[in-house]
Structure formats: C-alpha cells, structure tokens
Image (spheres, rainbow, N blue to C red):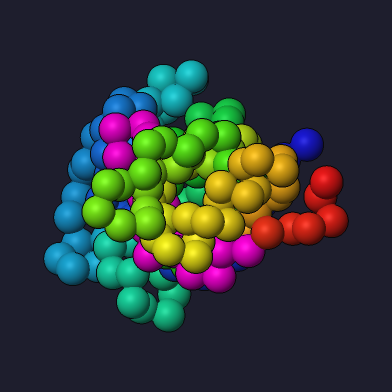
Amino acid sequence: MNVTVKDIDFLQNISPQSVAIYLQHRGWNQEKYVENKATIWTRKNEANESVHIILPLIQGTPGFPLSMSVMLETLEKIERRSQLDIIRDLVTRVDNITIQGVVQQINTPNADSLSGQIILIGVVVDKLHKIHTELFEREYILAIKAYQERLMISCHGDLIKRNNVFILKNITNFTLDQDSN
C-alpha cells in the first residue's frame, strides 16, 4: 500500500536543506541553481536514462507544499520507495507536532529543581521511536505518574532529529490518558 503525503502543514515544514542532503546521499547531483527559487537535481535511473527532480527553496511561498508533494511523488517513483520511507529519512525538524506514547525511562532528577530528562516511546512518521525530552515541575510529576502507572501520554512540541536521535523541545499540553490503563 502506497501512502501519499498531503498534509500541507507537514509539507510546508520539510527543510529544503534536509532534502538536498538526502539527495546527495542517494546519488543525485545538483545540476542547476535557479536563484532563490529552486535547484534541479539529476541522476541515472535503472535504464541509464537521466531523470530530474526540482527542489523548491523558499518555504514561505504559497506553492511550496504542492512543489514538495510533487517532489515526493517523483522520488517515490524513481527510487521505488514509499513516501513514508523517504520522509523518515528527511525529517530533521517538525514544529508543533502532537506526540502520543508512553514514558519508557525517567533519568535521575536535577538536584536543584523538580525537573529531569525522560525518554518517551512515540509515533513519528508512522513508526515507533525513542524521543528524548526534559520536563519541569507539573509535567515532570505527570511523567513519573505515567511511568509508574503505565499510562499513555500526549503532548505538543517541536521535534528535532539530531544524530539520528529524536528530541522534543518547547513542550506544551503534557497530559495523561487516564483511560489507557
């Protein structure tokens, strides 16, 4: 089953720099730079024919999400990979994402305040991942309760992928799902 990504907010937040790095690692070569608009990438397909892809560069433009969607569809066909697999490789930052999951680990709390590092297990782009974060005060207490009682949690934040590790920053609305037990 192929999944087509159509979420405008998600497409709007795909970093052109992340896509460029992805393309380089997958054997694409930047052929042309259209100043402040796009780059054109090329590589040979299985039939040794040149194939091209257009990478938009300006995230704030109205057509950016549509251009990213077309780029993903093209990559899916040329690379014979699902869009979800491609996106998993691309995701380096997603702002204001909702994470649902469980608290897997609570590290020793900070000595000077009611806070500490925790590790969540949550879904990112349709797959379970460990997500590192730091919580303070009330949210930290809720995380301890969720860990002890094996409750599901939900929260919003900015997800960053650094060195293949997911980190959740700027957390808001950290809540427990009391019905999950």
102 sits left or right of 168 in the view: right
77 sits left or right of 3 in the view: left
Residues 45 and 118: in front is: 118
The stretch of residues the image draws in magenta is 157-175
The correct choice, above or below, for 172 with respect to 38 in the image is below
For residue 164, which quarter of the picture? Answer: top left
19 sits left or right of 89 in the view: left
Q: What residue sits 48% from the left and 55% below the top?
A: 140
Q: Quadrant of the N terminus?
A: top right
Residues 45 and 147: in front is: 147
- The secondary structure making up most of the magenta span is strand
Q: Residue reaching furthest front?
A: 111
**Residue 86, percent across and down?**
50, 38
Q: What residue sits 58% from the left and 57% below the top?
A: 142
**Residue 43, percent across and down?**
34, 31
**Residue 35, percent across and down?**
15, 66
